[in-house]
Image (cartoon, rainbow, N blue to C red):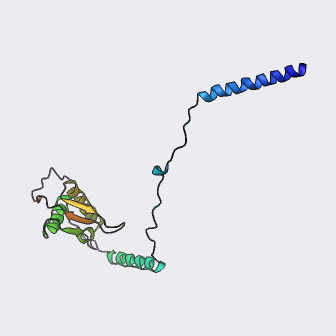
Amino acid sequence: MVQKLIEYRKYKGIAKHLQEKEMERSLIYSKEPEDLTPWVHVVMDNPVKGLHAADLLAAFQKAIRKATKRTSYARIQRDEISVKDRIREVLTALERNGPGSKLLFSRLLHEDMIRHEIVVTFLAILELMKMKQILCYQEKLFDDIVMEWTGGEPLHGISEVEINY
């Protein structure tokens, strides 16, 4: 009989312990696992798939040749160009062929351009997009940027207030 009382006390202690755990657990909220695949970063196909080492070497050599051509040791006084002036130049190039005409971004650049001129050209394109004068897109990843004139009103009278940098 004493043995049964000891065993009963043991079971009663375990029951009390389990009841305490149940109370603790009731304060915790958990939810069912859900599908997170829409938020998982998708690894794109290899953008250089199909290229061989010879292709990469040729591209590297071409870049080196361009870099050596650009190396200049003479100091040249540069003419500052404004975004407004560059916008006019881009629009003039597009207006030659009429509404819907297209122009590649690379056609606006030449080898003698310095970083400042390239940045100003890019800012001019961004401003033209903001003014809804051109649309820009790329056919494929890493392709040249294509600019298409929407045929809007020519902006020959761009005010200083509109573009102030």
On the question of residue 134 being in view, the answer is yes
37 or 70, nearer to the observer: 37
Residue ranking furthest to the left? 157
Image quadrant assignment for residue 48? bottom left
Nearer-the-camera pick, 88 or 81: 88
The x and y percentages for residue 19 are 69, 25
At a point 22% along the width and 69% down the height, the residue shown is 103
Identify the residue shown where x is 58% and y is 31%.
Answer: 28
Is 18 left or right of 52, judged from the image as shown? right
Q: On the rendered structure, is 42 left or right of 79?
A: right
In the image, taking residue 85 as reference, residue 51 lies left or right, namely: right
Query: Which quadrant of the figure has residue 5?
Result: top right
> Image point 42% across, 80% down: which residue?
58
**Circle count:** 0
Q: Position of residue 26 (x, y in %)?
A: 60, 28
Q: Position of residue 105 (x, y in %)?
A: 26, 67
Q: Quadrant of the C terminus?
A: bottom left
Q: Is residue 39 above or below residue 110?
A: above
Depicted 91 relative to depicted 162: above or below: below
Q: Nearer the viewer, residue 16 or 165?
A: 16
Picture layout, residue 88 above or below residue 63: above
Percent coordinates x, y for residue 117 in the rendering = 25, 65
Q: Nearer the viewer, residue 81 or 105?
A: 105
